[in-house]
Amino acid sequence: MATLIGLSIRVRLLRALPSRFKVSVEVSEGSHVSEHAVNKQLADKERIAAALENKNLVQIINQCIAVV
């Protein structure tokens, strides 16, 4: 769930900010049991790109960041 939340935050920032900004999303130290693994996944550009090619996952992310 932490990876999905981090990915949703990253996508929201990428969509909202101009492309000249670099986006980095990390789980703060001590806030998650597997923070190192989550941060590794969120920092991997290839893994992020592959996740954003998955239609089902993109639908879930869009639901997460939808403005009510």
Image (tube, rainbow, N blue to C red):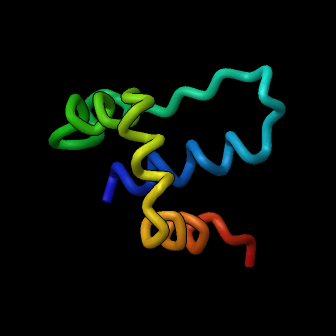
Quarter-of-image position of residue 34: top left
Q: Which residue of the protein is positioned furthest toward the right in this rendering?
A: 18
Q: Quadrant of residue 57?
A: bottom left
Side of 64 relative to 37 (left or right): right
Q: Is residue 8 above or below residue 40?
A: below
| Residue 3: percent from left, percent from top | 35, 49
In the displayed structure, would residue 31 be above or below residue 65? above
Q: Is residue 34 left or right of residue 10?
A: left
Query: Image point 83% across, 32% down: which residue?
Result: 18
Residue 10 percent location from the top left of the image: 57, 42
Q: How many marks?
A: 0
- Quadrant housing residue 54: bottom left
Viewer-nearest residue: 51 or 42: 51
- Residue 57, compared with residue 5, is above or below; it is below
Toward the bottom, the furthest residue is 68
**Looking at the figure, which quarter contains the C terminus?**
bottom right
Q: Residue at x 44, y 41 (%)?
A: 48
Residue 45 to residue 52: above or below: above
Q: Quadrant of the N terminus?
A: bottom left
Residue plotted at (24% across, 35% down): 35
Q: Report whether 64 appears left or right of 33.
A: right
Find residue 45 and report its horizontal and vertical position in percent. 44, 29
Q: Given the current orientation, which residue lies at the most extreme left position?
A: 33
